Image: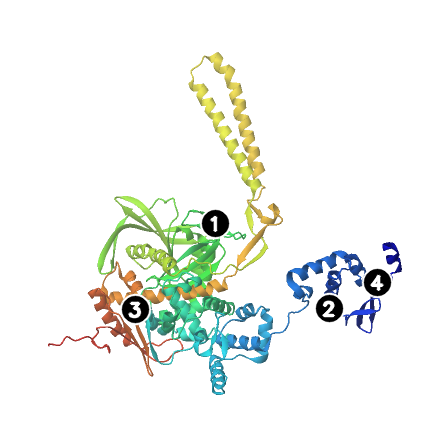
Amino acid sequence: MEQSAFENMPDPAGLALVACDGQVLVSCGRSLLYRYSDADTGMRNLAIVALTDAGRRVDEVAAVFGLTATYVSMLRGRARVQGSAGLVRRRGRPPKLSDRQVAKARVWAGEGLTQQVIAARLGVARSVISELVARNGVITPQEELITVVAAGEAGEGSVPVETPGGVPGSAPDAAPAAALARIGEGEHVSRYAGAMLLHPFLDRVGTEAIFASLAGALARRYDNLAVLTTATLGFALGAGTVEGFKHLRRTELGPVAGISMVPELVTLRGRLAALADNSDPLKLQRAFAAGMLAFDPAQDPVYHVDDHFVPYAGARPVAKGWNTKRRHAQPGIDDTHVVDARGRAVVFDSGGPTSLASNLPGVLTQLREVIGTDAPVLLGFDRGGAFPSAFTACKDAGAEWISYRRAPLVETTATAATSTTIRNGKEISVVLADETVAIKGYGDARQLTLFEHGAPVLQVLTSETTGTGAELLCWLRSRWRIENMFKYASEHNGIDTLADYAMDIDTDTRKVANPARVAARKTVKTAETALADAERSLARLLAAGGTPKQMNAALPGVHRRIEKAIQDLAAAKKALKPIPAKIPATELNPDAQLARPHLQRRGLQMVLRLLAFNAEAWLADRLNAYLTDPDEYRAITRNLLHQGGTINYGTHQISITLERPDSPRIAHALDLLTDELNHLQARLPGDHRPITYQITGHPNSTKTQPVLQEV
């Protein structure tokens, strides 16, 4: 019965697929199951999964659709995990931004966010944002506010927007939209109100005009003056890196720079990078140095120059230099700084680790651009630069030079005599031998030999012939001012920071020590030691006091040993002579590479750090004129930058009211300092309202003090 029933049933219907006129038809027997466009891959995959789920074998379905059984199994797995979304894979370009996303991008661009940040938020390439902004323009915070108000008046309620932090909110609460907005009027309490004391220096050196030179095409994107001023003040407040700005109160630092709030870290970093990529940091530093020397001229024509090594601890093949702090070779960058007699930074240069003699021509050219070609210059430097090439570079630049002589000291031919000078109102006497000596590779120079307790202790070389020996020696000893500058600026202004790790990696074309010559020199040293041992053996034999027969028997062997040692030494020296001391690095390793760091971004930050250092140094000198505390005045000034107070932006002026310091002598000195600063009529960069200063309890303070009344 069962067998006959199967025999009477019809044959099972098979699957069939027909493609015609761009359409695909999938049928089972006489029934049409699916019809879709031949370009619709998603519908095809859906049909495949549905047929297999209905009981059709995987290999059968794969054969009908012209696919492999493995691919069909993969489609079934995607459908189980991801549903229908797993059956459609996006190919080619990403979809265009929606109208809402375009509006967001225009608003963010108007707020000053960089195109890279906007692209990252929307998940598209930077070129998409660049084309969008060029085609549609930006929406400024004022235009956005007008749109929101209009929407509210039309009865649409609060218009949701997305803040730069990515948190949806309503337009009235979107405070970060005005992060770089200039302050019109209002009173702001800030723990950094003391940093407003730096603005007179920044105003007098021409900060606004110099910063404005960086604007160019970027000026339409955001307030460059606010960004650069914020960075300078942040470095003055002790932020060693740009990342350190996240530890400062944004709402309290903003009013110090003339804006309601400083930008977020990611925005500030991006803006500084964009400015640096379109700037010449060395030219900016020369402009600031010229402005500083015009506002507060140097009284003496003495400048000090030295190298400052910045170590690199990464894995890239950066060139090595000598780390003077740790006393060993290490990868890093070499900065060359020039400071004046008061320890103020004038010019600098950055590059790979080289010698001071190699860097002198570049910084001397910059110094001449700052002070003029005819200004007198006495350049002091340490023994590290005391080479004829450095002396020649100074001579070619029209500068006198002074340096310590490298060891060993040479014998003097002049008679020592007492030399005197006046320093800080005190007479200083030293015993010196003054003479003229010839320096190989340079020519004649003046040599001063200092005597203590009747013995020479150091020698000084100089091209200056008019000054007294004691005066020149005192100027050279003041070279420690540049060391103090390195120490202070490294600790408080972060000049040791690399700031940027972008590098170009090229083939290493430098010449390096030749291992073959090192081995040959070791062979010569071994031969010299063998010859000395052979000669000592002859002396020991003659001094042993043996019989003549014993001596005659031993002497030929000793003489042969000496003769062989002499021949070996001559052969070793002959083999050493043609071997070069240095060879290209690629001869030792064909794959040798050298990383050259990008220095523009670090250079701009260095300019801002040195500007903050010079501003604080100027403020400290002005404060110490009333404080008269040469030991602590720098630390006191640094703490005053963090003095709290109130910043009142009025219609015609900006009033700063600082909290009175607890120390009476510091409060009295600050009273006098604010009176002096008020006469300068300083202004913020980008704001033409004059700044006035006062402290609580000052006779001119507008704040009322509590008065005790009799009852």
Q: Are marks 4 and 3 in contact (CB under 8 Å)?
A: no
The residue singled out by tag 1 in the image is: 330
Q: Which mark is residue 43?
A: 2
In terms of secondary structure, where does tag 2 sit? helix
> Within the image, what quadrant is residue 19 found in?
bottom right
The answer to whether residue 240 is above or below residue 650 is: above
Q: Position of residue 42 (x, y in %)?
A: 71, 67
53 or 362: nearer the eye?
A: 53
Residue plotted at (42% across, 19% down): 543
Q: Type of residue at label 1?
A: Gln
Residue 551 image position (x, y, % from top left): 48, 15
- Which mark identifies residue 14? 4
Q: Earlier in the sequence, mark 3 or mark 2?
A: 2
Say which label, 4 or 3, has the lower sequence index: 4
Can you identify the residue that label 3 sits on? Answer: 644
Amino acid type, mark 3: Gly
Quadrant including the C terminus: bottom left
Task: Residue type at mark 2: give it.
Answer: Met
Closer to us: 697 or 92: 92
Question: Disc 1 versus disc 2: distance between alpha carbons?
Answer: 63 Å
In the displayed image of the protein, which residue is found farthest to the left?
711
Q: Residue at x 44, y 79 (%)?
A: 172
Q: Compute the Cα span from label 4 to label 3.
A: 87 Å
